[in-house]
Amino acid sequence: MENDAILDAIQRIWASEAIPPEFKLHATILGSMVAVLWGLELFDTLILRGALNRFGIRPRTFRGLQGVLLAPLLHGNLRHLATNTLPLITLAWFIMLRDINAFIIVTAVVWLISGLGVWLFGSARSNHIGASGIVFGYFGFLLLRGYFERDLVSLAFSGLVAFFYGGLIWGVLPIRRGVSWLGHAFGFGSGVFAARYLLQLQQWVESINATP
């Protein structure tokens, strides 16, 4: 009964107009991301014993191309996922604060470019999985966004990200054995690309949507 009362209170608060609709949308998207990632990893760990990991990016193989789409959803273990979860949702939320369309475009650009970069240039017979390429893409976008846009809000976000997550920059270097630094580097680079060409990308998307 006590749990039912708590749930009912949470539902009433969530349904109230005191919570801005934008916050509800952000929370729903981020919560869905976390649910998908953790649901998949728990299922893979507890039921499939890691069998899903074979669907990662295998460089320069036809079968490995599927990993471009699937690899960010897969992780080596729960610890690997836990390491990525907090920076992923924090940096994603920072981008959402700009607007949802920007978040969608940046995510798509980083997801595809970082994955294709690893597929083209990764070591033969290697297998790359994990959302860290996305994390580094968000990091690169937010870090350079202020430089390209030159407005106070963007510069403030860039400074905030540099302060809290500046240490991530070392992840683009091949200094840790067993870590896909190439995925980090291509993720970061694709985030910088998205920061530089975001306006053009948004206009391109709008032109596609406007085509009858």
Image (cartoon, rainbow, N blue to C red):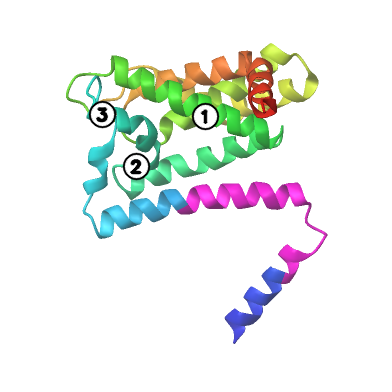
Q: Residues within 10 Å of mark 2 (few under 14, many from 20)?
A: many
Q: Secondary structure at mark 1?
A: helix
**Numbered marks: total:** 3
Q: Position of residue 63 (x, y in %)?
A: 23, 30
Q: Which residue is mark 2?
A: 74
Residue 100, image x, y percentages: 67, 37
Q: Residue furthest bottom?
A: 1
Prevailing SS of the magenta stretch: helix
Quick check: can you spot residue 189? yes
Q: Quadrant of residue 203?
A: top right
Decide: few, some or many residues near mark 1? Use Cα within 10 Å; few <14, some 14-19, many ≥20.
few
Could you tell me the amino acid type at mark 2? Leu
Q: Is residue 94 left or right of residue 137?
A: right
Bounds of the magenta segment: 12-35
Question: In the image, which disc is placed on residue 64?
Answer: 3
**Residue at x 31%, y 21% (from the top left corner):** 119
**In the image, what residue type sits under mark 1?**
Ala
Q: Amino acid at mark 3?
A: Gly
Across and down, in percent, residue 186 comes to 42, 18
Is residue 44 positioned above or below 138 on the image?
Answer: below
Q: Are marks 3 and 1 in contact (CB under 8 Å)?
A: no
Residue shown at 51% from the left, 43% from the top = 86
Q: Earlier in the sequence, mark 3 or mark 1?
A: 3
Quadrant (top left, top right, bottom left, bottom right) of the N terminus: bottom right
Residue matched to label 1: 108
Residue at horizontal 64 percent and vertical 19 percent from the top: 204
Q: Relative to the observer, which residue lies in front, 162 or 78?
A: 78
> Which residue in the rendered view is the most extreme toward the front?
212
Q: Secondary structure at mark 3?
A: helix
